[in-house]
Amino acid sequence: MKTKSKVLRLAACIVLCELAGLIGAVFTTPAIPTWYASLAKPAFSPPNWLFAPVWTALFALMGVSLYLAWSKGLTKSRMAAAAFAIQFALNIGWSFLFFGLKSPLYAFAEIVMLWVSIAATIALFWKLDRRAALMLVPYICWVSFASLLNYAVWTLN
């Protein structure tokens, strides 16, 4: 594949993944100063300003991971492609459930499924390209923390 095509494919993967963040922001942004501000949060809750840069970086890593897996035959691995698509959809869905529906309970149930789907994606990407799998490790670490935070918010409220 030519260098220009590779760069375009990489850019497309990153933009696609960053779009998940933009879609999630539709539900998140209006709820932060109102509903989310009114919730009891655990002492380990990070400041609100931290979430946007962390998620931007994680979506970029997800995009690079997708590109690497795609370059190594993702289109031939239906299981890996499906796992990535499922975790992608669940990621967007969490913002809708937590901030859109204002349901920490439903969001917690969903984030558990998100964690499992990320773990499956990592395992399946490992078979295609270990770098692609490793790019998702910060993502699953952050979602592990987010799961704990989600659970705490649910139980405190």
Image (cartoon, helix red, strand yellow):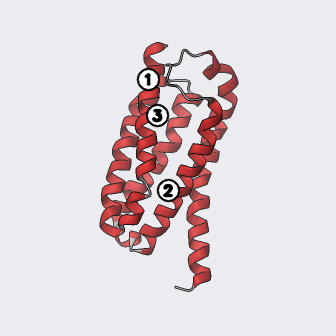
Q: Which residue occupies the extreme bottom position in the image? A: 2
Kindly identify which residue carries mark 2: 62
Secondary element type, mark 1: helix
Name the residue: 39% across, 30% down.
109
Q: Position of residue 96 (x, y in %)?
A: 55, 35
Q: Which of the 4 image quadrants contains residue 76?
A: bottom left
Secondary element type, mark 2: helix
Kindly identify which residue carries mark 3: 146
Amino acid type at circle 2 is Met
The tag on residue 105 is: 1
Q: Are marks 1 and 2 in contact (CB under 8 Å)?
A: no
Mark 1 neighbour density, 10 Å: few (under 14) some (14–19) many (20 or more)? some
Name the residue: 40% across, 51% down.
137
Amino acid type at circle 1 is Leu
Name the residue: 39% across, 58% down.
134
Q: Is residue 34 above or below residue 27?
A: above
Give the foreground label among 1 and 2: 2
Amino acid type at circle 3 is Ala
* Sequence order check, earlier mark of 1 and 2: 2
Number of numbered callouts drawn:
3
